[in-house]
Structures are given as C-alpha cells and as structure tokens.
Image (cartoon, rainbow, N blue to C red):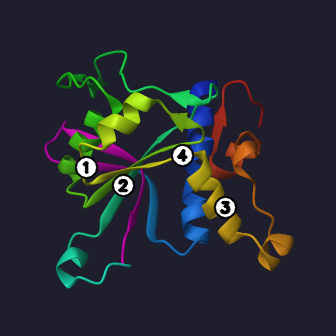
C-alpha cells in the first residue's frame, strides 16, 4: 500500500474524482497518473488524460490526446506562479515560472493536442490572462466540473450514487490501494 501525505491524499482524491467524472460522461481512453518518458531519466507525469474522438477532422484524430493538470485548492483560488524549482528523479528541470507555462511545456513534451488546467475552485485573473496566449490550453473551474457532474446524474445515480465535487474528501483511498499517513486502514 502506498502512503500519502495529507496534501498528496487531497490531490489524489481530486484526480480520482475527475477520472470517474470523465468516464461517466463517456470520455474515451481516460487514464490517471500517466508517465511519459523520452530518455532514461527525463519524463513528465500527466494527472489525467483522455482521447478526444469527438472531432470531425480525421487528421486531428491522429493526435487526439488531451491532458489535464489538476490543481486541488482548499483556499478556493489557484494562482499562476510556481514557488520553487522542480526536480524529477534527481534532475533539476528548467525553471518555469507559471502553471500555464508548465502545462504548455508538458503538452508539447507528451505531444498532446490540447491541455486543460483544472481546479475544484477558481483560477486567479492572472491565470485567465495567461491562458488567452495559448490556443491549445483551456481552463476548467468549479462551474464546468459541476456542469459535467450534473450531466452524469439521473436514474443511475440512484442505483450507483456519485460523490459531488464538494465531497471529494470522502473518497476512500484504501479502495485504490492508497492511504494517507493520517488515515488508518
């Protein structure tokens, strides 16, 4: 069993919730926590991805990968700036100043057609301005997630109830082979 810090557990619960939300809404090829490698130690991790097969252009179908970077916030608003330099497998990555620039770098690295920056709250005005500079990046905030959540509800929800966005913390990580250090199995 993998043990997570409370912060990691919150983010993982949000990833699981979004993964299930997309699957329940008919998105195809949904996967969570995917690693892409280009060299032995050079890789990027994608929180959630899916294949967008709803496009009509056959050339676009060749590259239908959509990646989602998830930012779970207990404070409600996610800012643009990154606090520190990142290390992966002991390797210091080039300095990237904002979450939007980081997502664009990741989108190019994994050769995704589109990237979606997603949060359970809201993004700052700065993030909204930055995203306008990129045609391949979208923002999904609380409202968009709640709309998708409403779409998946109905008679099936009576038989198989789904956890709403504001109850993401109720997801039982032990059923996914995970556990936070604070929780007991």
Q: How would you rate the neighbour count of disc 4 (Cα within 10 Å): few for under 14, some for 14-19, many for 20 or more?
A: some
Residue at 74%, 53% (x, y): give it. Answer: 164
Q: Distance between the Cα atoms at labels 2 and 1?
A: 7 Å
Which secondary structure lies at badge 4? loop
Q: Residue 65's x, y, as percent?
A: 30, 64
Magenta residue span: 34-53
Q: Distance between the Cα atoms at labels 4 and 2?
A: 15 Å
- Tag 2 and tag 1, C-beta contact below 8 Å: yes
Residue at 64%, 28% (x, y): give it. Answer: 74
* Residue 141 marker: 4
Would you say 29 lies left or right of 95 here?
right
The answer to which quarter of the image holds residue 157 is bottom right
Would you say 167 lies left or right of 104 here?
right
* Residue 107 marker: 1
Vertical position of residue 101 compared to residue 92: above or below = below
Judging depth in this view, the residue of 37 and 14 nearest the camera is 14
Is residue 22 among what the camera can see?
yes
Q: Residue 88's x, y, as percent?
A: 28, 29
Judge whether residue 139 is colored magenta.
no
Q: Distance between the Cα atoms at labels 3 and 1?
A: 25 Å
Please identify the quadrant where the C terminus is shown: top right
**Precedes in sequence: disc 3 or disc 4:** 4
Residue at 25%, 49% (x, y): give it. Answer: 107
Residue at 26%, 50% (x, y): give it. Answer: 36
The residue mark sitting in front, 4 or 1, is: 4
Q: Name the residue under label 2.
A: 67
**Precedes in sequence: disc 4 or disc 2:** 2
């Amino acid at each position: 069993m993998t043990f997570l810090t409370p912060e990691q557990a919150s983010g993982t619960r949000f990833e699981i919730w979004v993964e299930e939300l997309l699957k329940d809404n008919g998105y195809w090829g949904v996967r969570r926590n995917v690693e892409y490698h280009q060299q032995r130690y050079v890789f990027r991790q994608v929180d959630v991805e899916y294949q967008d097969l709803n496009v009509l252009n056959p050339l676009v179908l060749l590259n239908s990968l959509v990646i989602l970077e998830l930012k779970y916030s207990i404070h409600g608003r996610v800012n643009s700036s990154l606090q520190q330099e990142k290390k992966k497998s002991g390797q210091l990555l080039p300095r990237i100043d904002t979450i939007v620039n980081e997502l664009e770098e990741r989108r190019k690295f994994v050769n995704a057609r589109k990237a979606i920056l997603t949060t359970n709250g809201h993004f700052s005005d700065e993030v909204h301005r930055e995203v306008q500079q990129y045609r391949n990046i979208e923002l999904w905030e609380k409202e968009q997630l709640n709309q998708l959540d409403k779409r998946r509800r109905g008679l099936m929800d009576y038989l198989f109830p789904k956890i709403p966005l504001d109850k993401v913390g109720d997801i039982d990580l032990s059923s996914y082979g995970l556990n936070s250090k604070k929780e007991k199995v």
